Amino acid sequence: MKRIKSIDILRGLSMCWMFIGHILAWWIRDKDRHLYLETFE
């Protein structure tokens, strides 16, 4: 079965986005909280 590269790229980008979002949510400092809120809400 042939792999569709665009789906793999989308999947990889979404996994990176989720990883970065979790890192920001867990380890963000209070003075940088506005960056998290602007990005994910």
Image (tube, grey):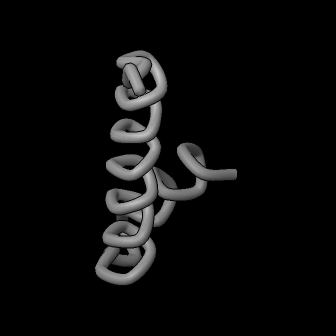
Give residue 33's position: percent from left, percent from top: 46, 65
Looking at the image, the residue that sits furthest to the bottom is 26
Give residue 10's position: percent from left, percent from top: 45, 29
Q: Is residue 24 above or below residue 4?
A: below
Q: Is residue 33 above or below residue 39?
A: below
Asked which quadrant contains residue 19, the reply is: bottom left
Report whether 38 appears left or right of 14: right
Q: Give me the residue at 59% from left, 56% from top.
A: 37
In which quadrant will I find the N terminus?
top left
How many numbered discs sit on the rendered protein?
0
Q: Give me the residue at 49% from left, 57% from top.
A: 36
Q: Is residue 26 above or below residue 17?
A: below
Give residue 24's position: percent from left, percent from top: 36, 67
Depth check, front residue: 33 or 14: 14
Report whether 31 appears left or right of 10: left
Asked which quadrant contains residue 3, the reply is: top left
